[in-house]
């Protein structure tokens, strides 16, 4: 008999929504937060060229790294390797890279990322000091908190013209 094992649903993070918005500005058709076999996917782009090669983007929040470091968790490296082996072009948007780019330059940053070849393996950056990582993490948390506040208490108004 076949059994259905329900996967835990995932909500896109504010960081993922921001990346998705910028991809939309680039007019890149994509799909957010879904399950592809056993793999949870963040963003998958439509195959506009029809070449059979699939493109995806993983938005790496601080939980993708060992605590207070910029070193990827082993499971993230394994997923990157497996998806690449299965024919995916896997690109990554690191939370600290995204914050370091000025908001008005993020569309161009994504354009460059998408036009460059996808790395076959997920490599760590040089280990940075813990204090530096914690400072960036606190800045990231403040931005997310501010975004959630705006979404909750300052919703966009719609002019229905009534």
Image (cartoon, rainbow, N blue to C red):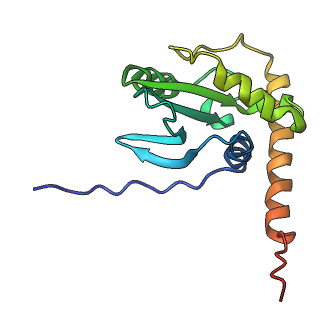
Quarter of the rendering containing residue 126: top right
Q: Is 78 displayed left or right of 25 in the figure?
A: left
Q: How many marks?
A: 0
Q: Residue 9 location in percent, x, y?
A: 48, 57
Q: Residue 45 location in percent, x, y?
A: 54, 38
Q: Residue 60 location in percent, x, y?
A: 64, 34
Residue 66 to residue 127: above or below: below
What residue is at 69 percent from the left and 41 percent from the top?
23
Q: Residue furthest front?
A: 49
Q: Residue 64 location in percent, x, y?
A: 61, 32
| Residue 100 visible in the picture | yes
Q: Residue furthest left?
A: 1
Q: Nearer the viewer, residue 96 or 45?
A: 45
Q: Residue furthest top?
A: 126
| Residue 66 visible in the picture | no
What residue is at 84 percent from the left and 62 percent from the top?
149
Residue 128 to residue 52: above or below: above
Q: Is 159 displayed left or right of 42 in the figure?
A: right
Q: Quadrant of the C terminus?
A: bottom right
Q: Quadrant of the N terminus?
A: bottom left
Residue 157 to residue 85: above or below: below
What residue is at 34 percent from the left and 57 percent from the top?
6
What residue is at 78 percent from the left and 27 percent from the top?
109
Residue 43 to residue 51: above or below: below
Q: Nearer the viewer, residue 157 or 8?
A: 157
Q: Nearer the viewer, residue 27 or 94?
A: 27
């Amino acid at each position: 008999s076949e059994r259905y094992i329900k996967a835990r649903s995932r909500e896109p993070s504010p960081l993922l929504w921001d990346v998705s918005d910028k991809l939309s500005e680039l007019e890149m058709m994509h799909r957010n937060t879904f399950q592809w076999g056993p793999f949870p996917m963040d963003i998958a782009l439509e195959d506009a060229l029809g070449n059979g090669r699939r493109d995806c983007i993983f938005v790496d929040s601080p939980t993708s790294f060992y605590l207070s470091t910029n070193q990827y968790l082993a499971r993230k490296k394994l997923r990157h390797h497996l998806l690449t082996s299965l024919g995916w072009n896997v690109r990554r948007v690191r939370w600290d890279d995204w914050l370091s780019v000025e908001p008005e330059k993020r569309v161009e940053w994504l354009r460059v990322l998408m036009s460059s070849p996808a790395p076959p393996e997920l490599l760590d950056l040089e280990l940075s000091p813990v204090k530096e990582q914690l400072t960036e993490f606190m800045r990231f948390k403040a931005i997310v908190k501010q975004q959630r506040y705006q979404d909750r208490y300052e919703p966009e108004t719609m002019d229905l013209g009534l």
